[in-house]
């Protein structure tokens, strides 16, 4: 058990490095239950992801998560968001990056940074209808190409739609 | 005879695809030029369904994801709910969970080695492995009344206590397993056909493996020492002594070696958990209706297949706003294309098997 390094508290150094390189890019920070969530703007997302991997040691993209706040999102929030759950093996820190997304403006694809983003982005496209610019083959992954709609959207009925497929 | 590129379809009703998986292959003679997995045949819309169910109602549905290791799914989900709701599980409950999760890993790896050997053509291993797995499933049956879809870990703890007689029964079962594992190794380790079908087949390097998001035994077979039980311990894993088996070549053979040794380590952990089982309650007091204020968590565990995770966002009601499952099989399957390229077509079955995928978990 002696070879287990202690989990480091706080994420100040990562946030400082992010702020230093991308002034104004960090829009909000939330730390609760031992997890740190950072909201960034979509404008420099591709560079931020590359920076976190190449210079901050976040070697692995654990998962990508799509969110839909519904057709009438709460004030101050957009309808969709995409979360990146990334992992730094050196000190075993996990960081959650969140970015607002919408149908009209695709987010940059993370596949060039982590290849594990390939199917993750296809899943978000399938379930939410969000696109990722520069993805090598963005298409549905679970549902048929002819399927109408994106099931994890809040306005998609639980029982499905007649004539959906 | 000279062939040019041939398109070949495998599945979704092929016996070696471990469920309903389709592979689109392009081959040149016997060599794989490219491969594309097509998934979704078992898609049941679990994540959508979960948004309409209470946290308690979701737990038994997680059994239907990786149905070879249902307890691991239960554990991953309830840990995320407990973290979200701030529920503290009593030490006895945590230890029982560790024992159940490691027994589940044993059962899952035994099923895996049986199927893997069968896929490659060593039929007898399947019989030995499944006989041993049955003994572990018998324990689950006695504990909770089910063998596969067990629903054996609940929010706040576990559904039943371990009484001294049951503890002795688990120990007796464990006494008999090393001989079976040894038998399987005697059949396979030095077997020339097994070695030629697995060594240097489906190779992936350490850096590529991390980039592809591989986790679990396929990652550790490349020499990367990542194990959530060690790195980000949950459910009291920090109290237990165990090794993380590693290999170095990242091929099918090394994935086999890692899983065989993991079974021994699992038995070691179960024995420690039973020997040091703390007194007290096996479950916390959980409100009958669990309403969780708005928050979000991401919790992962080391499941038999790899890193299994649940992201949950709560909204103040008794139902989640969003649940996203990180399925290790889904992410591990993605790299099959890379691993298979340049290999013999007949080895694709072995490479696919070595990833230990379960379609229930991939398709959600």
Image (cartoon, rainbow, N blue to C red):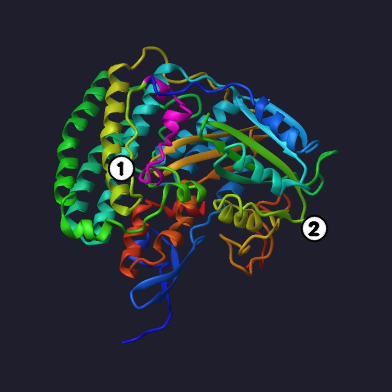
Question: Tag 2's secondary structure?
Answer: loop
The chain carrying label 1 is B
Q: Position of residue B113 (x, y in %)?
A: 27, 49
Disc ID at residue A104 = 2
State the residue position of label 1: B258
| Among the 4 quarters of the image, the one containing residue B344 | bottom left
Q: Is residue B104 left or right of residue B82?
A: left
Is B79 magenta? The answer is: no
Read off the magenta span: B219-239
Does the stretch in magenta take in B235? yes
How far from the left and from the top, in percent, is residue A32? 65, 25
Quarter of the image for the N terminus of chain B: give it. bottom left
Taking the view exactly as shown, the residue that stands out farthest to the bottom is: B1
Q: Residue at x 33, y 23 (%)?
A: B241
In the image, residue B102 above or below residue B190: above
Disc 1/disc 2 C-alpha distance (Å): 47 Å
Q: Nearer the viewer, residue B9 or B364?
A: B9
Along the viewing direction, whichever of A21 and B261 lies nearer the viewer:
A21
The quadrant holding residue B337 is bottom left
Q: Position of residue A33 (x, y in %)?
A: 61, 24
Residue occupying image coordinates x 22% and y 26%: B171
């Amino acid at each position: 058990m002696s070879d287990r390094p202690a989990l480091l508290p706080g994420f100040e150094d990562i946030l400082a490095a992010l702020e230093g390189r991308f002034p104004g890019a960090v829009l909000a920070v939330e730390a609760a239950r031992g997890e740190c969530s950072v909201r960034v703007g979509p404008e420099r997302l591709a560079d931020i992801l590359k920076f976190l991997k190449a210079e901050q040691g976040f070697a692995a993209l654990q998962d990508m998560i799509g969110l839909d706040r519904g057709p009438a999102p709460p004030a101050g929030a957009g309808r969709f968001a995409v979360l990146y759950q990334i992992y730094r093996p050196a000190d075993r820190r996990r960081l959650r990056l969140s970015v607002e997304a919408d149908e009209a403006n695709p987010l940059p694809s993370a596949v060039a940074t982590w290849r594990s983003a390939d199917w993750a982005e296809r899943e978000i496209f399938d379930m939410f209808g969000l696109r990722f610019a520069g993805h090598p083959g963005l298409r549905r992954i679970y549902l048929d190409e002819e399927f109408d709609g994106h099931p994890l959207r809040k306005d998609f009925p639980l029982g499905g739609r007649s004539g959906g497929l | 005879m000279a062939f040019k590129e041939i398109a070949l379809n495998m599945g979704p009703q092929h016996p070696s695809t471990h469920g309903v998986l389709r592979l689109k292959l392009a081959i040149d003679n016997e060599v794989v030029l490219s491969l594309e997995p097509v998934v979704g045949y078992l898609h049941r819309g679990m994540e959508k369904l979960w948004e309409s169910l209470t946290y308690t109602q979701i737990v038994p549905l997680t059994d239907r994801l990786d149905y070879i290791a249902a307890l691991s799914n239960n554990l991953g989900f309830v840990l995320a709910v407990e973290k979200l709701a701030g529920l503290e599980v009593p030490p006895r409950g945590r230890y029982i969970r560790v024992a159940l999760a490691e027994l589940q890993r044993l059962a899952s790896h035994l099923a895996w080695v049986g199927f893997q050997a069968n896929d490659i053509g060593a039929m007898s291993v399947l019989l030995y492995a499944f006989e041993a797995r049955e003994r572990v499933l018998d324990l689950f049956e006695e504990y909770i009344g089910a063998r596969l879809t067990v629903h054996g870990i609940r929010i706040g703890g576990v559904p039943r206590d371990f009484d001294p007689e049951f503890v002795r029964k688990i120990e007796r079962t464990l006494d008999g397993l090393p001989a079976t594992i040894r038998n399987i190794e005697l059949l396979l380790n030095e077997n020339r056909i097994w070695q030629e079908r697995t060594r240097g087949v489906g190779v992936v390097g350490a850096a590529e493996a991390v980039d592809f998001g591989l986790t679990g035994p396929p990652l550790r077979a490349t020499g990367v020492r990542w194990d959530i039980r060690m790195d980000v311990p949950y459910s009291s894993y920090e109290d237990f002594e165990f090794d993380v088996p590693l290999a170095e070549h990242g091929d099918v053979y090394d994935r086999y070696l890692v899983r065989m040794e993991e079974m021994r380590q699992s038995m070691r952990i179960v024995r420690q958990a039973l020997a040091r089982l703390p007194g007290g309650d096996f479950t916390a007091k959980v409100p009958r209706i669990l309403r969780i204020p708005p928050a979000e968590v991401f919790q992962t565990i080391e499941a038999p297949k790899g890193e299994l995770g649940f992201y949950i966002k709560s909204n103040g009601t008794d139902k989640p706003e969003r649940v996203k499952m990180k399925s290790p099989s889904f992410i591990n399957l993605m790299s099959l294309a890379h691993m298979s390229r340049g290999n013999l077509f007949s080895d694709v079955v072995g490479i696919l098997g070595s990833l230990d995928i379960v379609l229930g978990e991939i398709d959600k």
